[in-house]
């Protein structure tokens, strides 16, 4: 007896520093990234998420909420950055923009 093929699914993931959630959602024909997020239930589970402004990606590549999905896509919900990465690098290096020293050569 032949087995029925497994239904197509997508994963929707959201991570906090101390917790992460992965939800598998059946893929409907023409499903968008935002529709998968809504179907996952993560918007209700994490009230800080706003469907109108949520940032999404598929496998680390930023996509629009209207992006059509394919089987086995992994939709990632991104949190806002707390600090601009350029500012963080400057702070880590202990330097400020415009405060560069020039090296004086001795002869």
Image: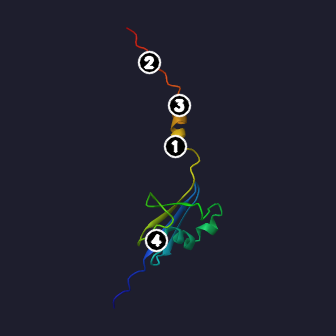
Measured Cα–Cα span from mark 2 to mark 4: 56 Å
* Earlier residue among tags 2 and 4: 4
Q: Circle 3 sits on which residue?
A: 97
Q: Position of residue 91 (x, y in %)?
A: 55, 35
Measured Cα–Cα span from mark 4 to mark 1: 30 Å
Residue placed at 51% from the left, 67% from the top? Answer: 12
Measured Cα–Cα span from mark 2 to mark 1: 28 Å
Measured Cα–Cα span from mark 4 to mark 3: 44 Å
Tags 3 and 2 in contact by the CB under 8 Å rule? no
Measured Cα–Cα span from mark 1 to mark 3: 14 Å
Q: Circle 4 sits on which residue?
A: 10
Residue 103: image tag: 2
Q: Position of residue 8 (x, y in %)?
A: 42, 77
* Earlier residue among tags 3 and 2: 3
55 in relation to 8, above or below: above
Q: Residues within 10 Å of mark 4 (few under 14, many from 20)?
A: many
Residue placed at 57% from the left, 44% from the top? Answer: 83
Measured Cα–Cα span from mark 3 to mark 2: 17 Å
Task: Give the residue at the far left of this rendering.
Answer: 1
Q: Position of residue 69 (x, y in %)?
A: 44, 70
* Earlier residue among tags 4 and 3: 4
Q: Circle 1 sits on which residue?
A: 85
Frontmost of labels 4 and 3 is 3
* Earlier residue among tags 2 and 1: 1
């Amino acid at each position: 007896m032949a087995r029925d093929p497994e239904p197509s699914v997508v994963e929707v993931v959201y991570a906090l520093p101390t917790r992460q959630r992965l939800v598998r959602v059946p893929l409907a024909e023409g499903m968008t990234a935002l529709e998968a997020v809504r179907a996952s239930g993560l918007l209700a589970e994490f009230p800080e998420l706003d469907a109108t402004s949520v940032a999404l990606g598929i496998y680390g590549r930023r996509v629009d909420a209207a992006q059509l999905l394919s089987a086995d896509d992994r939709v990632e919900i991104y949190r806002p950055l707390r600090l601009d990465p350029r500012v963080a690098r400057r702070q880590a290096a202990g330097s400020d923009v415009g405060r560069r020293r020039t090296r004086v050569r001795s002869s």
